[in-house]
Amino acid sequence: MEATIHKFYTAFQQLDYTTMQSCYTPDAVFSDPVFGLLDGNEVRAMWEMLCKRATDLKLSYGNIQVLDDEYATVEWVAVYTFTQTGRKVVNKIKAHMRFNDGLICEHSDAFPVYRWCRQAFGLTGLLLGWSGYFHKKLQLKAKTGLQKFMNQ
C-alpha cells in the first residue's frame, strides 16, 4: 500500500498521469467535493485532464497512515492556479484509500469545499460557496468538462 501511495503522489508531482492511472484497479471509484463520484474510466481521465491542464502545480504529501490490510489515508497539499478564474488555490486534502492486490480500488479526497470555493472563486465563492446549489453547479460543470475531455 505505502509503495503504491508513494508511486501515485510522486507521479502526480511529475504530472505523470499514466503512472497515476496504473495505481488503480480497472473498476476503481473516486469521489471528491468538486467532481462527485467517478467510475474507473472517469477517474483515469480526470487525472489525465488535471495533469495536462496544470501549469504551476506544486504538490506535497505525507502523514501516510496504514490503517489495516485494505485501508490507508494520506494528507496532501496542492498549490496551483485555478485556470477558470486565474486565482491561486492552496488545497489541503485528506485522501482515504482502499486497496485490492496493491492497487487503489476506492479513493476519496476530503477537503472543506467552502474554503476551496473562496480561494478559487473569490467574492463569488465567499458569498455563494457555502450553498448546496453552488456545490451542485460546481459538480455539474466539473463533470461536464470531464465528459468533454473524454470525448476528445
Image (spheres, rainbow, N blue to C red):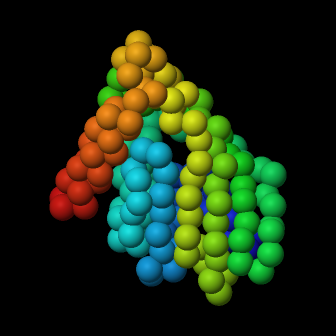
Check the image and report above or below for 101 versus 30.
Answer: below
Q: Residue at x 59, y 73 (%)?
A: 104
Q: Pick the residue in front: 6 or 96.
A: 96
Check the image and report above or below for 46 versus 88.
Answer: below
Q: Position of residue 64 (x, y in %)?
A: 79, 58
Q: Is residue 7 visible?
A: no
Q: Is residue 133 visible?
A: yes
Q: Position of residue 27 (x, y in %)?
A: 44, 80
Tally of numbered tags: 0
Q: Residue at x 48, y 58 (%)?
A: 31
Image quarter in which the N terminus is found: bottom right
Check the image and report above or below for 47 versus 115.
Answer: below
Taking the view exactly as shown, the residue that stands out farthest to the top is 123
Q: Position of residue 141 (x, y in %)?
A: 27, 42
Q: Residue at x 69, y 65 (%)?
A: 5
Q: Position of residue 63 (x, y in %)?
A: 81, 52
Q: Pick the residue in front: 54 or 41.
A: 41
Check the image and report above or below for 83 versus 29.
Answer: above
User: Which of the 4 quarters of the picture holds residue 84?
Assistant: top left
Q: Residue at x 18, y 59 (%)?
A: 152
Taking the view exactly as shown, the residue that stands out farthest to the bottom is 101
Q: Pick the residue in front: 117 or 13.
A: 117
Looking at the image, residue 33 sits to the left or right of residue 65; the answer is left
